[in-house]
Each structure stands twice: as C-alpha cells, then as structure tokens.
Amino acid sequence: MNINTSSTGEEIASMALAIHQLVNGLPITMRTLENPGVRIEDSKIVDSEYTGPVLEEVLKEGKVVREIPETGAYQGIPVVVVPVIEEGQVIAAIGVVDITKGIYSDIMEITKRPEELNEPRGDVQ
C-alpha cells in the first residue's frame, strides 16, 4: 500500500478500517492532503468522500489536535486527529472519534506508564 498526498478515499480505506479495529471499533476518519477520504463506523465505510473541520485543520497545521468540533458530522463529540508526515510533509490526517464522550481519552491518559518513579511504592524502590 502506498499512501500519498493524492490518494483517494478508496485507496486509504483498508488502512482506515485496520485502525478502526485497533481502537476497538471507535469511528475513524481519514483523508489525504489533496482528496477527501473515508468515515468509518461499525466496521463499514459510511462516507468515501469525507472531510471534516478538524481533519482540515491538522492537514494545514501538521500538529495533533484534540478537541470537540463545533460543526460537522461529529459536532459535540471529542476527537483526536493526527497528521501522517512523510519526509517532512503532511500527506494525510487520521482521526479517532471518542464516542465514549472522553472516557477513551481519559483511560489512555490514566494508563500511561511513568517514565520514572520518583517515590518508592510499597516495597518497590
């Protein structure tokens, strides 16, 4: 599979479906820099010409965005969108829609492993 700035929704669908499975079926959105992409829910492509305001923001800024969109298909629902960068250029954006209303994001934060333990815990030094 070769994803580039002009890949279409059909061309990126298999990757987006795989990511959808990795995040336990949370809705996924994905598009490339030059073309609309896909919106996936319940293991099905519900839109193969999809774009959204946060995907477009990430394509423009090239940075991870965690926010609650005020418009679009996922208005009022937390999303996390990340850029796909190749050789310093943003080529695509992938988003996870947190339909758990933030619980998924909270669990990911809570379960991070500390880099160092600053204080002893029990008999662990």
Image (spheres, rainbow, N blue to C red):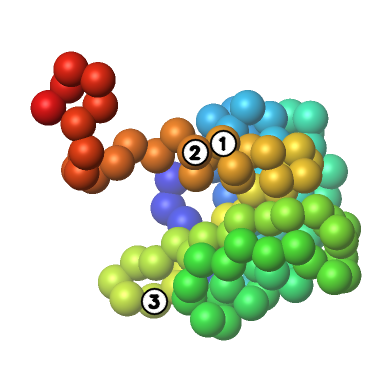
Classify residue 69 by image quadrant. Answer: bottom right
**Quick one: SS at disc 1?**
helix
Check disc 1 and report the residue beneath it: 107
Compare residues 95 and 106 and report the one nearer the observer: 106
Give the residue at x 61% y 62%. 66
Q: CA distance from mark 2 to mark 3?
A: 32 Å
Count of numbered circles on the image: 3
Q: Position of residue 116 (x, y in %)?
A: 20, 43
**Which numbered disc, 1 or 3, marks the residue closer to the eye?**
1
Q: Is the residue under label 3 in contact with that under label 1 (CB below 8 Å)?
A: no
Quarter of the C terminus within the rendering = top left
User: Which residue sits at x=39%, y=76%?
Assistant: 89
Amino acid type, mark 3: Gln
Q: Position of residue 85 (x, y in %)?
A: 39, 67
Question: Which of 56/121 is in front?
Answer: 121
Instruction: Name the residue furthest top.
Output: 123
Residue drawn at x 53%, y 81% as measured from the top left = 61
User: Which of the two labelled residues, at mark 1 and mark 3, occupies the earlier sequence position?
Assistant: 3
Separation of marks 1 and 3 at Cα, in angstroms: 31 Å
Residue 34 in the image, given as x and y percentages of width and height: 61, 75
Give the label on residue 37, or none. Answer: none
Q: Which residue is mark 3?
A: 89
Check disc 2 and report the residue beneath it. Answer: 110
Residue 54: in sight, yes or no? yes
Disc 2 on helix, strand or loop? helix
Q: 113 or 55: which is nearer to us?
A: 113
Residue type (three-letter) at the residue carrying disc 1: Ile
Q: For mark 1, does the 10 Å Cα neighbourhood hold few (<14), some (14 to 19), or many (20 or more) residues?
A: few
Disc 3 secondary structure class: strand
Q: Residue 22's x, y, as percent?
A: 54, 30
Amino acid type for the residue under numbered disc 2: Ile
Q: Residue furthest left?
A: 125
